[in-house]
Image: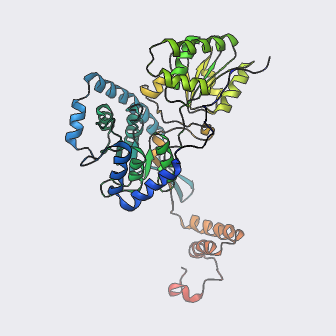
Amino acid sequence: MGRQYLKEVIGLPGLKAAPSVNVPAVVKEVIESIRKEGDVAVRRYSEKFDKWSPQSFRLSQADIDTAIANCPKQTLDDIKEVQLNVRAFAEAQRGSIKDFEVEIRPGVHLGQKNVPIDNVGAYIPGGRYPLLASAHMTILTAKVAGVKNVIGCTPPINGEIPYSTVAAMHLAGADEIFLLGGVQAVAAMAVGTETIRKVDFLAGPGNAFVAEGKRQLFGEVGIDLFAGPTEILILADETASAFTVATDLISQAEHGPDTPAVLITTCPELGYSTMEIVNRLLTSSDLSTAAVAKTSWEAFGEVIVVDTVDEMWELGNQYASEHVQVFTRNPRDALERMTNYGALFLGEKTCVSYGDKVIGTNHVLPTRTTARYTGGLWVGKYLKTCTYQEVTSDQASGDLGRLCGRAARAENFEAHARSGDLRANKYKNDEIGWIEKSQVANGSRL
């Protein structure tokens, strides 16, 4: 029968037209201004973009206590329970990363240490939605990794402190919390100001300006990943429920108007039923985000029918989606068949929303097919895997010296070779032509 596209991407009207705002230029101006003027520029851009200019952007302990006091008890209890899940998984990840030392030959010791980054800046978005779950994923994970200092920045919402987000940041372990949003927050953390410590690494999602800021600052600081719109891919066979598939596609489409929501299935009936249910749910339900989800689904939703399960896996790997849900008779087959994905969600009892909000795995994941070469944010992103070497045997150092001399001269690196020659001379009594007698101390070898 061949592959059938029951629904294809059409894109948003005018998507290819020139943008009204030159995002890279705006971001570059903000970064350079903050680099030159520090806090003065931070305040200017906060007033311009967020209408926010408090006496201090940094929240005091009293401010944090007030935020926590203003959170409903159930919200605080839920934050704590979710963070227990995130912490448990992050600690398991950290436990899987081992330091080691090995003696590869007598007297030659090689080792590896996983050293936490000193200073991390976490950006917690607050525009369309206050994504307090991002506090768990970025701040808490960094603290489990052993990061000494984590700064958290989140914007005000309608000129007010987002109490729940602040509570989540504090409970996650943030050492300093700033009520500061947008690219001005990212730039201030990356370059440092009079009141904001310069960090070594930036983590957390954000809008197009935040994402561009991280792109321009990458190299000067590390970043978690280059993020694009949220993505969901569902791989399903005839055993899947069309209502569940439709509900889960919509759950991600509500993130924004440009979210790819894709179904690949071996069952045409499931494809048609899913499209009918999606359209019905988006037009007849009381979904508060229906307008955004409808725009996203109409522009970027896809439904594809393939002939075989093998073709389903193959096409799924080509999409390399951020989130991949698997609704098949044997969903754990995906662990062997899928190689390109940000995170897998196996079976109908789980869903992407669990990963986004509560289950414990990290929700900062690769998008735009970057899952072909990288995974998402995890404890290991906050660690520097560093090596060390020690030679304790005279014989081993002399043997390595001879080997180094030959290997370096094969590459025309004479000075490298001479470092090896010195050890061969000292520990193996090799006669080295370039070493003059006057360089030998008291008539002995160097």
Image quadrant where residue 273 sits: top right
Q: Is residue 188 above or below residue 318?
A: below
- Residue at 39 percent across and 57 percent down: it is 34
Q: Is residue 444 left or right of residue 1?
A: left
Front in this rendered view, residue 144 or 258: 258
For the image, the number of numbered tags is 0
Quadrant containing the C terminus is bottom right
Front in this rendered view, residue 249 or 8: 8
Q: Residue furthest bottom?
A: 438
Residue 336 at x, y percent in the picture: 64, 27
Q: Is residue 436 above or below residue 240?
A: below
Quadrant containing the N terminus is top right
- Residue at 46 percent across and 22 percent down: it is 289
Q: Is residue 221 left or right of residue 12?
A: left
One can see residue 118 in this view: no
Residue 394 at x, y percent in the picture: 54, 67
Q: Is residue 37 above or below residue 356?
A: below
Q: Residue furthest right?
A: 1
